[in-house]
Amino acid sequence: MGLRINDQAPNFDAETTDGKINFHDWLGDSWGILFSHPKDFTPVCTTELGYVAKLKPEFEKRNCKVIGLSIDPVDNHAGWAKDIEETQGTKVNFPMIADTDLKVAKLYSMFPADENAAMENRTAMTNATVRTVFIIGPDKNIKLMMSYPMTTGRNFDEIMRVLESMQLTVAHKVATPVNWKDGDDVIIVPAVTDEMAKEKYPDGWKTLKPYLRLVKQPN
């Protein structure tokens, strides 16, 4: 059975462009984003890695680490990083896992457990299922899973938005409505009674239905 939201994120040891890591130790008390690529020197992923490098300071402000994964060895990652800097205008400033034996890909249900791990003649299309994003909380549990098709670049602005939403909803007993962005009104969750809400939100809120109450975003 595959992984689900709120499952513990599988731990692993891996070689990366920053040296060998233990994933849970590397995460520490931070949030984490693990995003995978079918193979080095692929066009869509080149644009993604460059954009994530530009966003890294914003992720850091939100106590979130970023790590990439590809099935190619570390030396290949280094060569690809040069192409990314040349074409995207940003150095790759986060670690990339060298998942040459598909261990991490299988742990995270990106491939069937019996997938042949031989590197020879593997192409990006062979590895099509390695195109996923996981957001992992400080408790090491999976908070989000997304899988994309080969030809569609991932929307890391959306991934940032979801991270902000999850961090807000962890800190306050609220939920975020459709298309919510930082600063928009939020929803008081049903578990919070009106009496409890009066203490928490003395300036009041807008009731559309007894189960749908909107309030200004808490700081």
Image (tube, rainbow, N blue to C red):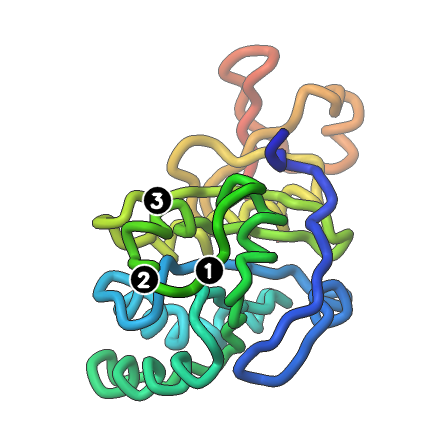
| Label 1 crowd (10 A; few <14 / some 14-19 / many >=20) | few
Checking the image for residue 55, the label placed there is none
Give amino acid for label 2: Asn
> Considering only order in the chain, which callout, 2 or 3, is on the residue closer to the N terminus?
2
Q: CA distance from mark 3 to mark 2?
A: 23 Å
The residue lying toward the viewer, choosing from 92 and 150, is: 150
Q: Is residue 197 above or below residue 72?
A: above
The reply to whether residue 201 is visible in this rendering is: no
Task: Give the x, y percent position of residue 122.
Answer: 34, 59
Type of the residue with mark 1 = Ala
Q: Are marks 1 and 3 in contact (CB under 8 Å)?
A: no
Q: Quadrant of the C terminus?
A: bottom right
Q: Are marks 1 and 2 in contact (CB under 8 Å)?
A: yes
Q: Is residue 107 above or below residue 186?
A: below
- Above or below, comparing residue 42 to residue 157 in the picture: below
Amino acid marked by disc 3: Tyr
Q: Position of residue 86 (x, y in %)?
A: 23, 87
Res. 92 image quadrant: bottom left
Q: Real-space Cα distance between discs 1 and 2?
A: 8 Å
Q: Which residue is mark 3?
A: 148
Residue 218 x %, y %: 62, 47
Res 65 visible: yes
**Element type at mark 2:** loop
Residue matched to label 2:
121
Element type at mark 1: loop
How packed mark 2 is, by other alpha carbons closer than 10 Å (few <14, some 14-19, many 20 or more), is few
- Whole-number angstrom distance, CA of label 1 to CA of label 3: 24 Å
Which mark is in front, 3 or 2? 2
Residue under label 1 = 118
Residue located 61% across and 61% down the image: 32
Instruction: Tell me the quadrant of the picture where the N terminus can be found.
Output: top right
188 vs 214, left or right, is right
